[in-house]
């Protein structure tokens, strides 16, 4: 049995929350647009040293900063691969690009609280390093 009063009340609260956070959301969208317009693949490739563990960390770090949608990360990953960047670093970059959101942190913390947002991003960052290593090792065993 649906309680229409509760549904309507929940809907009104949701709309009010979105309206309250709209300035933050718009700011994040604008920041993402700025970051995407300034990303240069050749310059990103210069940050990698050739050390697998260090490059994996750097890949996760850069992916955390240059957050975006997955389709863009695949294109950037392909360009990094063409520049002889390790698969460990590229996989970590893609994982962090999609899961860690430094740019979106203000919006996320306004919705879920700063503690949750920081813990989630830290966990996602660490996971992106570990999972990328496991993925590349698994691919190595398969092929």
Image (cartoon, helix red, strand yellow):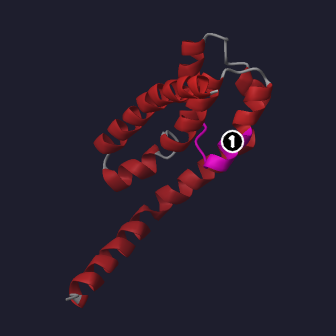
Specify the quadrant of the image occupied by residue 12: bottom left
Q: Nearer the viewer, residue 112 or 130?
A: 130
Compared across the picture, whether 116 is left or right of 45 comes to left
Residue bearing mark 1 = 74
Quadrant the C terminus occupies:
top right
* Residue 55 is one of the magenta-drawn residues: no
Query: Residue 115 at x, y = what percent?
Result: 29, 41
The magenta stretch is 66-75
Residue 39 in sight: no
* Residue 72 is one of the magenta-drawn residues: yes
Identified at 53% across, 36% down, the residue is 96
Question: At numbered mark 1, what does the secondary structure look like: helix, strand or loop?
Answer: helix
Q: Nearer the viewer, residue 7 or 33?
A: 7
Query: Residue 72 at x, y = what percent?
Result: 69, 46
Q: Is residue 94 above or below residue 72?
A: above
Identified at 51% across, 24% down, the residue is 133
Query: Residue 16 at x, y = what percent?
Result: 36, 72
Identified at 19% across, 89% down, the residue is 1
The mark tally for this picture is 1
Identified at 23% across, 88% down, the residue is 2
Q: Nearer the viewer, residue 94 or 28?
A: 94
Which SS type dominates the magenta stretch?
helix
Label 1: few (<14), some (14–19) or many (≥20) C-alpha neighbours in 10 Å: some
């Amino acid at each position: 049995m649906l309680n229409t009063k509760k549904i309507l009340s929940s809907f009104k609260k949701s709309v009010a929350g979105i309206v309250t956070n709209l300035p933050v959301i718009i700011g994040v969208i604008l920041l993402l647009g700025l970051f995407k317009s300034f990303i240069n693949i050749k310059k990103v490739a210069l940050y990698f040293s050739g050390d697998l563990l260090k490059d994996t960390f750097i890949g996760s770090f850069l992916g955390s900063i240059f957050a975006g949608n997955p389709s863009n990360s695949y294109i950037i990953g392909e360009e990094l691969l063409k520049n002889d960047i390790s698969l460990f670093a590229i996989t970590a970059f893609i994982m962090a690009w999609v899961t860690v959101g430094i740019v979106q942190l203000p919006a996320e913390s306004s919705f879920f609280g700063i503690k949750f947002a920081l813990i989630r991003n830290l966990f996602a960052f660490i996971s992106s390093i570990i999972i990328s290593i496991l993925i590349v090792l698994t691919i190595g065993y398969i092929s």
